[in-house]
Image: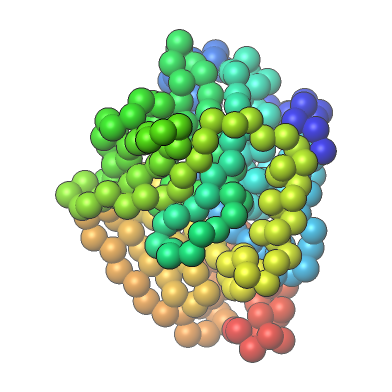
């Protein structure tokens, strides 16, 4: 696996994310692409549950996320986004983070994020966190609350360790992940990707995860629990049958019906659907 990879067919990528904006390497282009990507390419782990390998080379990522209309998790999403940005002339530094959101365990560094340069400033870009992930890039400046529609974010720093925090407009800050500014090699991601997609302790191995983000709401499916988060308020309900699960994954999350059918059959064999 190489960071360079093959060139991305930008026209087809833009069509996939419904993007018709500029292509100059500016903060506005970065923001518009980031929002379009998270709105149109869902966060999901179907291939892990179906026993399919997760490939991180640019051809495989393009075939899955663009051509096949699928989603993916952080390594897939942020590798593709980084390749697009670099092709547009944006400088990208690939980083790794330790997720701390709603866990008491010390987890390995299995989240990929990007530090990018645009308009003479550094930005945190992350189209692959799902759930509470940012909709827009964040200025890489500590201790500044940055509103994004019904949510807000900030990055904080202590002794060289950075932490991304999020919250609803009036809520308390919650830490999502922490990281240092150490560039990651392809081998680092290969190891982390293998752990995430195969280790029994990985949440992506243990059950279904599928999210779809938009400015007005976040649709978050974990197992059979579906949460609709609108920032100021959120509601959760349980999916009770196969047809309802299929409808959520296809109509709500935006996944191809054939892959959804294969997933539901697999979950039924396991007694999870």
Q: How is the image coloured?
A: rainbow
| Depth check, front residue: 44 or 2 | 2
Q: Residue 183, can we see it?
A: yes
Q: As drawn, is 148 to the left or to the right of 140?
A: left
Residue extending furthest toward the left: 170
In which quadrant of the rendered image does the N terminus lie? top right
| Depth check, front residue: 109 or 203 | 109
Q: As drawn, is 29 to the left or to the right of 55?
A: left
Q: Position of residue 134 (x, y in %)?
A: 42, 42
Residue at screen point 48% across, 64% down: 105
| Depth check, front residue: 268 or 114 | 114
Residue at screen point 46% across, 21% down: 122
Residue extending furthest toward the top: 120
97 in relation to 21, above or below: below
Q: How many marks?
A: 0
Q: Dividing the picture into quarters, in which one does residue 9 lie?
A: top right
In which quadrant of the rendered image does the C terminus lie? bottom right
Q: Position of residue 85 (x, y in %)?
A: 61, 24
254 in relation to 90, above or below: below
Residue at screen point 69% across, 51% down: 192
Q: As drawn, is 223 to the left or to the right of 186?
A: left
Q: Position of residue 180 (x, y in %)?
A: 52, 35
Q: Position of residue 25 (x, y in %)?
A: 54, 15
49 in relation to 77, above or below: below
Residue at screen point 56% across, 54% down: 43
Q: Residue 22, can we see it?
A: no
Residue extending furthest toward the front: 159
Q: Dividing the picture into quarters, in which one does residue 259 lie?
A: bottom right
């Amino acid at each position: 696996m190489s960071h360079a990879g093959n060139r991305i067919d930008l026209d087809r990528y833009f069509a996939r994310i419904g993007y018709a904006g500029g292509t100059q390497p500016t903060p506005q282009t970065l923001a518009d692409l980031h929002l379009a990507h998270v709105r149109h390419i869902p966060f999901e782990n179907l291939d892990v549950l179906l026993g399919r390998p997760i490939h991180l080379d640019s051809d495989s990522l393009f075939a899955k996320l663009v051509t096949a209309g699928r989603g993916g998790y952080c390594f897939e999403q942020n590798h593709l986004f980084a390749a697009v940005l670099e092709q547009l002339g944006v400088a990208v530094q690939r980083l790794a983070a330790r997720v701390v959101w709603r866990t008491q365990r010390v987890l390995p560094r299995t989240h990929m994020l990007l530090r990018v340069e645009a308009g003479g400033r550094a930005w945190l870009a992350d189209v692959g966190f799902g759930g509470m992930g940012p909709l827009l890039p964040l200025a890489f400046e500590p201790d500044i609350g940055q509103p994004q529609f019904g949510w807000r974010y900030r990055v904080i720093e202590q002794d060289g360790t950075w932490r991304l925090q999020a919250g609803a407009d009036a809520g308390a800050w919650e830490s999502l992940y922490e990281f240092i500014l150490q560039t990651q090699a392809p081998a680092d991601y290969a190891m982390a990707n293998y752990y995430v997609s195969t280790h029994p302790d990985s949440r992506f191995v243990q059950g279904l995860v599928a999210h779809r983000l938009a400015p007005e709401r976040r649709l978050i499916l974990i197992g059979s629990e579906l949460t609709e988060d609108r920032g100021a308020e959120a509601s959760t309900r349980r999916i009770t049958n196969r047809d309802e699960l299929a409808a959520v994954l296809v109509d709500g999350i935006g996944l191809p019906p054939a892959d959804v059918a294969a997933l539901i059959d697999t979950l039924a064999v396991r007694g999870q659907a």
